[in-house]
Image: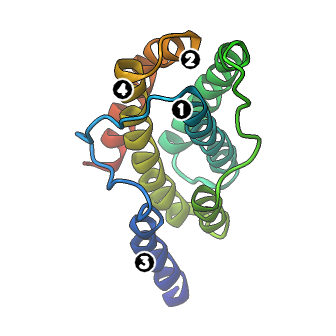
Amino acid sequence: MIRTLMITSALLLAFPAFAQDAAAPTASMAPMNVTEPAEFGAMASISNLFELESSTLALEKASSADVKAFAQQMITDHTKAAQDMAPAAAEEGVAPAKELDKRHGDMLDALSDLTGEEFDAAYVQAQVQAHDEAVALFEGYSTNGEEGPLKAFAAATLPTLQSHQEHIHGLSGH
């Protein structure tokens, strides 16, 4: 029991450290100033992969029905987002990322070591961070990005991400 509490505490304290190479995410995080299609494509596809992989893990490991329901919604919506992004990226000559970057991989690895309530708390925290970052990315690109299919994709996807952000903040109590 003490070991589980220590691991959970360490992971919850570590999640902000994973974000050190990115702006500190908050519900009111300023839009990111990403203007190039290749940069947006890489960041958006990594974000999407993390949502899909962490939510698939949540279906296996979460104990809360609310967390599992949120995870299933993430899988449904982010699968659609990947399908919608693919032709837009191809039209602009951008290849979406096929794997997570180190930061997101580390977050996924940390989650994979947990189960039950400890997993639920860490997953919700990771989703808060991921959605705050995604909303900032998509807001910024839909406003400042180069005109084209990826900018249209960002603008069309943003309301769904904002809905996810609101939902996960509700689950987190923040």
Estimate how packed mark 1 is, as few (under 14), some (14 to 19) or many (20 or more) residues with alpha carbons within 10 Å: many
Circle nearer the viewer, 2 or 3: 2
Circle nearer the viewer, 3 or 4: 4
| Disc number placed over residue 139 in the picture, else none | 4
CB contact under 8 Å: marks 4 and 2 = no
Horizontal side of residue 62 vs 83, given as left or right: left
Disc 3, SS? helix
| Disc number placed over residue 9 in the picture, else none | 3
Residue beneath disc 1: 40
- Specify which label sits upstream in the sequence, 3 or 1: 3
Tell me the kind of residue under disc 3.
Ser
Residue situated in front as seen by the camera: 149 or 74? 149
CB contact under 8 Å: marks 2 and 3 = no
Q: x%, y% of residue 153?
A: 53, 14
Q: How far apart are the two marked residues, 4 and 1, measured between alpha carbons?
A: 11 Å
Q: x%, y% of residue 119?
A: 55, 61
Tell me the kind of residue under disc 1.
Phe
Circle nearer the viewer, 4 or 2: 2
